[in-house]
Amino acid sequence: MSPFLDLPPLSAADFAAIEDKVAALLHTSADVIVTQGEALLPLEAAIRSAARPGSTALNIVTGPYGQTFGNWLRDCGATVVDLAVPFDTAVTAAQVAEALAAHPAIDFVSLVHAEAATGNTNPVAEIAAVVRAHGALLMVDAVASVAAEPLLTDAWGIDLCVIGGQKAMGGPAGVSAVSVSERAWERIAANPAAPRRSYLSLLDWKERWTDAGRTTLPHAPAQLEMLALGACLDRIAAAGLPAVIARHRAAAAAVRAGVRALGTVAPFVPDDAHAAPVATTLRTPAGLSAAGLAADLLRLDPTLPVQPGGGALADSMLRVNHYGPAASLATVRAFLTALATTLGADGGADTVAGADAGSALKAADAAWESAVAAG
């Protein structure tokens, strides 16, 4: 019999302890609600709880998730102002300030911290300061940034911060969490359209669990997923969050340095300051299909964390996921070696005929060491 079948039931105290560990990871004293589902659950719950008919929302679009948030906001009856920038760059606090000044009625802002799908990251601290000065509520999707880069929820003034465990945390995909500030709770409570008696209801959780003292769970917990979340939080605490962040930064720096040394493919996000540490996206030249390149790489090494871009980017973007256990120099070196081998074997890629991984590996090693030393 599997030892997992003999586990004692997860108690309310166990569940509350995991919430407290999430709060510590997010550097917040706000209420944290752990939701039993993929991170789209608390993301939609946060928007449908805080957005209301007649309100005006600024939706910052730097990738596909921003587009999804805009659809939810409109469905809630909000007037939506989209601030969209090219997916190979980041939005700036100045651009956000300009949008807020042009639309003074904005009272809610949605933002993705890091876009794993496109490989960019946004300066949340600077943007949050602008949003707070305007008086709007800020929701941040930190699913791809938590544990990969700094995330100071309270210090930055994030009202709704949503995370998932499956990326840099190296945990399960079936549980997620959202922190809710007092300002956010006040707005949600005053919203007659906020979900109630619903799986999307944050208010139900607050009333039946948080405000009730966290002594009786309102449902049967997903035992294995919750234990996995607790385990990955413990691993991060044991390693030290700064060390985990440094490892992800080093992986991104090493991939970018290696592919630049190799040539042919180049970072999709050209500015290093705009690049997310959780995943590196690469732009392939005309005539070199990213989907075909990904397939060739995986045939060579099925363990490589690579995939083509989504939708229209499938032919021109290759994504390298270096998060969680894959944020390692060994993974980076394996990818670069396979990339050099694959490109060198492509008779049609004249610019890399006979490609040698040596220069790429040397550049990656140097970039890794420099990033780790910088912390």
Image (spheres, grey):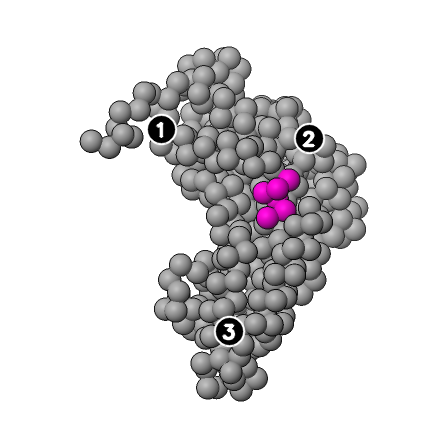
Three-letter amino acid code at the position of disc 1 = Gln
Q: Which residue is mark 1?
A: 223
**Left or right for 52, reference 129:** left
Query: Alpha-carbon distance for marks 2 and 3?
Result: 44 Å
**Left or right for 7, reference 372:** left
Which label number is shown at residue 241?
Answer: none
Counting from the top left corner in percent of width and height, residue 94 is at: 79, 51
The magenta stretch is 242-247
* Mark closer to the chain start, 3 or 1: 1
The residue under the point 57% across, 84% down is: 351
Query: Alpha-carbon distance for marks 3 and 1?
Result: 44 Å
Query: In this orientation, which residue lies closer to the viewer: 239 or 259?
Result: 239
Q: Which callout, 2 or 3, points to the residue nearer the camera?
A: 3
Seen from this angle, which residue lies furthest left? 1
Give the crowd class for mark 3: few <14, some 14-19, many >=20 residues within 10 Å: many
Q: Quadrant of residue 266?
A: bottom right
* Mark closer to the chain start, 2 or 1: 2
| 16 is higher (above) or lower (below) than 164 | above
Q: Is residue 246 magenta?
A: yes
Three-letter amino acid code at the position of disc 3 = Ala
Badges 2 and 3: C-beta atoms under 8 Å apart? no
Question: In this view of the protein, can residue 115 be seen by the observer?
Answer: no
Counting from the top left corner in percent of width and height, residue 149 is at: 63, 45
Q: Which residue is mark 2?
A: 154
**Left or right for 368, reference 329:** right
Q: Quadrant of residue 229?
A: top left
* Mark closer to the chain start, 2 or 3: 2
